[in-house]
Image (cartoon, rainbow, N blue to C red):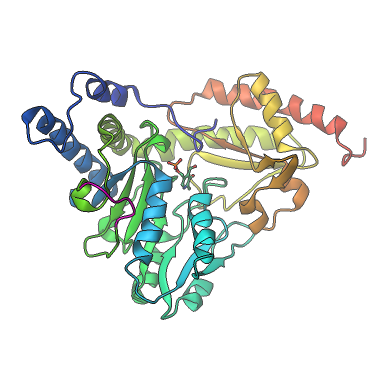
Amino acid sequence: MDNNATTKVAREAVEEMMPYLSDLYGNPSSMHSFGGQVGKEIVQARQRVASLIGCSADEIIFTSCGTESDNTALRGSLATAGNKRKIITTRVEHPAVLGTCRELEHHGYTIVEIGVDKQGRVDLDELRKCIDDDTAVVSIMYANNETGVIFPIDKIASIVREKGVTFHTDAVQAVGKIRIDLAKSNIDLLSISGHKLHAPKGVGVLYVRKGTRISPFMLGGHQESGRRAGTENVPGIVALGKACQLAREHIDQEKTSVKKLRDRLEKKILASCPDCFVNGDRENRLPNTSNISFEYIEGEAILLLLNKFGICASSGSACTSGSLEPSHVLRAMGVPFTAAHGSIRFSLSRYNTEQEVDFVAEKLPGIVNQLRRLSPFVKN
Ligand code: PLP
């Protein structure tokens, strides 16, 4: 139940990558045919990624992860933006974007973080007003990793395009879960992470629309047509290609069977646990994600007790040096402090089953009652 953290690698992807971890270990940049045959596999993987998101293969750059793709998009576009010093983003981005922006602030850039409403939705008028002649890049995520809320990215991309500014979207949580067609969109840069869509960790993608000016972030060899140096993670790339092909075949299953499982889980929890509610816009949400706040109790305590039953989920707070900080996403949405502390994210995949969902729904009410009996916030 923690697939937004990472996913099971598809068996088919493991099978395709295995030869490149053993006998076929050539370097794709080599002149000889031993390396050359490996290079052909990268060509195929690039095509498969491109087919999933509706772009051409030469617009795909392989990276090491979603974080590298986000960093490359931001730093790479700033490097070509001349004197422009403004970056527009939102308050609910992943740290890969927010952390990068905040670091850039120390180097003289101005960061504008657009807020969200109670449902986690961005205000497009506010975005329009913020974009000016000093704006170098706008970076707004496709779908939120904590709540699953999907932003109207094609609309946002068009607003940004009208102003002649580069637009990046962190689509790490969206790719493979909802249909994305870049041929019909004005997105310039888009980040993907392999391990969120049933490929292994250590491989990602940055889509760069033809004509978008960005400087390489990693310098060195001439891999990826000089756009990202470093010898390619061949097994990871081969597996990612296969995972993208599978994602394309299974994309309808996300909004049918995976959504059905998520809805079943949510319905059962809401019916059996009093004082809990779903966070985020329930209409525009990833089909696999449910973020639920349980009033008066700590999310981390719920997680520990779920873990005893072998159930994996995530909480909206991070335990740092003894103090529990509630999630920046829920705080930006104005979720009350106690409810933000008691939030749990359940995130499913096509590999989850109805039995698993029912098992979680069966165990959770007992856990919630147990913790509420101990809670100083509940009057017994
Ligand atoms: N962006 C979002 C929205 C994410 O959810 C994550 C990972 O959780 C990342 C970026 C970072 O991806 P990676 O783990 O591949 O660096």
Q: Is residue 52 left or right of residue 291?
A: left
Residue 275, x across and y down, in percent: 77, 42
**Residue 10 in magenta?**
no
Residue 373, x across and y down, in percent: 86, 30
> Which of the 4 quarters of the picture holds residue 310?
top right
Label tally: 0
> Which of the 4 quarters of the picture holds residue 319?
top right
Image quarter of the N terminus: top right
Placement of 149 over or under 165, stated as above or below: above
Residue 200 visible in rendering: yes
Q: What residue lies at 81% left-to-right and 26% top-to-bottom? A: 370
Q: What residue lies at 55% left-to-right and 22% top-to-bottom? A: 356
The answer to which of 358 and 52 lies nearer the viewer is 52
Residue extending furthest toward the bottom: 133
Residue extending furthest toward the front: 220
Q: In this view, does 141 lie to the left or right of 325?
A: left
Image quarter of the C terminus: top right
Residue extending furthest toward the right: 380
Q: Is residue 100 left or right of residue 16?
A: right
> Which of the 4 quarters of the picture holds residue 317?
top right
Residue 45, x across and y down, in percent: 22, 37
User: Which residues are the magenta region?
Assistant: 216-221
Residue 165, x across and y down, in percent: 36, 72
Q: What residue lies at 26% left-to-right and 42% top-to-bottom? A: 49
Placement of 298 over or under 97, stated as above or below: above
Residue 55 visible in rendering: no
Q: In this view, does 217 lie to the left or right of 111?
A: left
Main SS of the magenta segment? loop
Q: What residue lies at 49% left-to-right and 66% top-to-bottom? A: 107
